[in-house]
Image: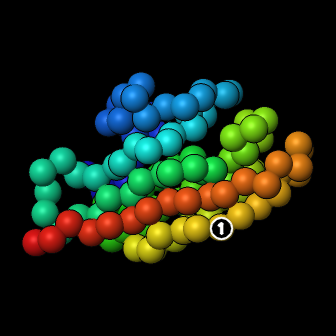
Amino acid sequence: MGLISRREFFNVCGLAGVVAVMGGTALLSGCTQNEAGAEGTYTVTVVSGATLEETDTKTGTYKYKRKCEACDWEDKSSKTVKGKSVSETFTCPQCKFKQNVVINVSKAEK
């Protein structure tokens, strides 16, 4: 599967994983992305405060943007992470809401 776009991610997760859609960007919560039935691949799960831009399920590398769940503000820049989970906090520059970013990464056993 390799790198996939947000549209492909939406097609994988369906409406069950979409919390809100703002300006063509889906806020995904509790939705996982991995290569169906493949062993030795990574699964990336957005729990809160972020949108996935792209994911490489073979290396566990993914790009995400911080997103405020209170006012739908989204960071213009993205961060790239390889094979590890993220847990951070930021204050939304628009509404001043303190937001948690939680992204879990797990690797399937071979």
Residue 18 locus on image (x, y percent) = 49, 31
9, above or below 18, in the image: below
4, above or below 17, in the image: below
- Name the one closer to the observer, 76 or 43: 43
Q: How is the image coloured?
A: rainbow
- Name the one closer to the observer, 25 or 32: 32
Report which quarter residue 7 is drawn in: top left
Can the viewer see residue 5 in this picture?
A: no
**Label 1 neighbourhood size at 10 Å, few (<14), some (14-19), many (20+)?**
few
Q: Which residue shows up at 44% across the image and 74% down it?
A: 84
Three-letter amino acid code of the residue under disc 1: Glu
Residue position marked by numbered label 1 in the rendering? 88
Q: Relative to 18, is 96 on the left or the right? A: right
Viewport quadrant of the C terminus? bottom left
Q: Relative to 96, is 106 on the left or the right? A: left
Q: Which residue shows up at 73% across the image and 45% down it?
A: 68
Report which quarter residue 80 is drawn in: bottom right
- Name the one closer to the observer, 51 or 30: 30
Q: Which residue shows up at 39% across the image and 57% down it?
A: 44
The image shows a total of numbered marks equal to: 1
